[in-house]
Image: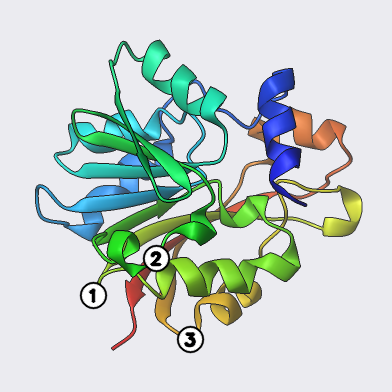
Amino acid sequence: MDADFWLERWRDGRTHFHQARVTPLLAKYWPTLELPTGSKVLVPLCGKSLDMVWLAQQGVQVLGVELSALAVEQFYAENGLQAQVREAGAGRYYQAGDIEIYCGDIFDLGPEVLGTCVGAYDRAALVALPAEMRARYARHVYGQLSDGYRGLLITLDYDQAQMEGPPFSVNDAEVQAVYAGHSDAVLIDRRDILAKEPKFAERGLTQLDTLVYRLQRRP
């Protein structure tokens, strides 16, 4: 799965993964991280998520990362924000107020950018990546965040044989393995959501759980 897969989805409007609301589990658990006002928070593979607006309203600086310029431009336009744009390295930065989005490949970002983030929120990135990319992604991103960072991770757990991803199933055993080298991943919530997600039942799933983790740099 490469960049063209996601760019094509945005071009074709096949963005059923976009939520037209703030994620309830974010609103419930984000305050428990107790990040200081003004903290910079990374939102990888952010699309045009309204979660970024909510995070900014909590007093943090948001740094989203997204491959699709179309998604980024839609985000600012749909939220009535006028973004300033600047070129930097292999990508382009858009910024309006406390929400900045890097339009480019997250693997092109190094510690000079990722190291400024003391928080992270991942609802869409880990579950969007095939199995062979997940450990590399976690090591590159979370291994370069600020020492002592705190974050929130949301994944899905289902029988991968019943449905092709994305979103992919990333169960607790895999989360622990993927983050073991640099971060503690503490499971703080697990709930059955299949009844609330009929489109997944239509695709053949008989079980679907959402898992919520509190992440923190391992000493």
Above or below: residue 142 compared with residue 99: below
Tell me residue 35's x, y (percent).
Answer: 17, 57
Residue 169 against residue 56 in the figure, above or below: below
Looking at the image, is 179 positioned above or below residue 90?
below
Drawn side of residue 56 relative to residue 90, left or right: left
Counting residues from the start of the chain, the first of labels 2 and 3 encountered is 2
> Can you say which quadrant of the picture contains the C terminus?
bottom left
How packed mark 2 is, by other alpha carbons closer than 10 Å (few <14, some 14-19, many 20 or more), is few
Total marks drawn? 3
Image point (40%, 12%), residue name: 77
Local SS, label 3: loop
> Residue at position x 34%, y 84% from top?
218
Give the labeled residue for mark 3.
181
Q: Secondary structure at mark 1?
A: loop
Numbered mark located on residue 110 in the image: 2
Q: Horizontal placement of 81 versus 134: left or right?
A: left
Q: Secondary structure at mark 2?
A: loop
Discs 2/3, front:
2
Tell me which amino acid carries mark 1: Gly
Q: Give residue 148's mark.
A: 1
Across and down, in percent, residue 142 comes to 42, 69
* CA distance separating discs 3 and 1: 14 Å
| Residue at 69% over, 18% down | 13
- What amino acid is at disc 3? Gly
| Sooner in the amino-acid sequence: mark 3 or mark 1 | 1
Instruction: Please rate how many residues cluster around mark 1, counting C-alpha atoms within 10 Å: few if below 14, some from 14 to 19, many from 20.
Output: some
Residue 54 placement, left or right of 141: left
The residue carrying pointer 3 sits among few (fewer than 14), some (14 to 19) or many (20 or more) residues within 10 Å by Cα, namely some
Frontmost of labels 2 and 1 is 2
